[in-house]
Image: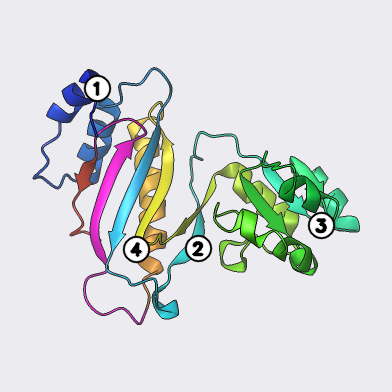
Amino acid sequence: MKHGKKYQEAAKLVDRSMQYDTAEAIALVKKTATAKFDETVEVHIRTGCDGRHAEQQIRGAVVLPNGTGKTVRVLVFAKGDKVNEAEAAGADHVGGEELIPKIQNEGWLDFDVVVATPDMMGVVGRLGKVLGPKGLMPNPKAGTVTMDVAKAISDIKAGKIEYRLDKANIIHVPVGKTSFEEAKLQENFDALMEAIVKAKPAALKGQYLRSITLATTMGPGVKVNVAKY
């Protein structure tokens, strides 16, 4: 992949062979953000897990203390009085059965997170082929299948993010924007790492965290020292 001039200039600031402590890495990532928009700061965590084994799967959610800097659109599948509860809590879209053809046939996807009450999972399950590959399927472990829709919505709006292993056993998550103060990015990063460390599968033998890299949307990766985790 050929990178532009700005990226190459930014990459010169990063010592590829070095693992930085978190504060240095965050400062460096902010310095290497050269895009004209407010880039997202992402964390990529390579694990020693093998996600093909159910007992080594990692999936969960954490509320970042300072949010992600992104407005999150929430779709809620609910019925009865849960519809009013979801609307009152600030859901962007609320519905049931009638949303299936809209999503399946019309390709409507104007939402970032899907929450469902347990009694609606039969309906939502029919959207598995559409929502599954996009990582949008509600899941009890991530707190998105729940009767307490109001809490789920307020957590998501406040900066709750989901983390899970991809096919290469890497976790990719946003921890804020480059416009955030360093201290706020640090707090978000610490909250995420605390959750990831707690999520270590009991069945795992060997090293859990292989590498941690911080990067902005368009910037070079900065390696973080894994030793403290």
Quadrant assignment for the N terminus: top left
Report the Cα–Cα distance between label 2 and label 1.
36 Å
Magenta span contains residue 203: yes
Q: Closer to the observer: label 4 or label 3?
A: 4
Q: Closer to the observer: label 1 or label 3?
A: 1
Q: Which of marks 2 and 3 is nearer the N terminus?
A: 2
Q: Say which amino acid is labelled 1.
A: Gly
Q: Which class describes the residues within 10 Å of circle 2: few (<14), some (14-19), or many (20+)?
A: some
Q: Which residue position is annotated with label 2?
A: 60
Question: Which residue sits at x=66%, y=40%?
Answer: 73
Picture quarter containing residue 220?
top left
Q: Which of marks 2 and 1 is nearer the N terminus?
A: 1
Q: Closer to the observer: label 4 or label 1?
A: 1
Residue farthest along the bottom direction in this orientation: 203
Q: What is the secondary structure assignment of the residue under circle 4? A: loop
Quick check: can you spot residue 171? yes
Q: Where is residue 28 in the image (x, y as percent from the top left)?
A: 22, 32
**Left or right position of 134 against 191:** right
**Segment colored magenta:** 202-220
Quadrant assignment for the C terminus: bottom left
Q: Which class describes the residues within 10 Å of circle 3: few (<14), some (14-19), or many (20+)?
A: many
Q: Which residue position is annotated with label 1?
A: 4
Residue 168 versus residue 108 in the image, above or below: below
Q: Say which amino acid is labelled 3.
A: Ala
Magenta span contains residue 52: no
Instruction: Give the label on residue 114, or none.
Output: none
Question: Which residue sits at x=40%, y=26%?
Answer: 179
CB contact under 8 Å: marks 4 and 1:
no
Q: Which residue position is annotated with label 3?
A: 78
Q: Which residue position is annotated with label 4?
A: 169
Quick check: can you spot residue 137? no
Q: Say which amino acid is labelled 2.
A: Gly
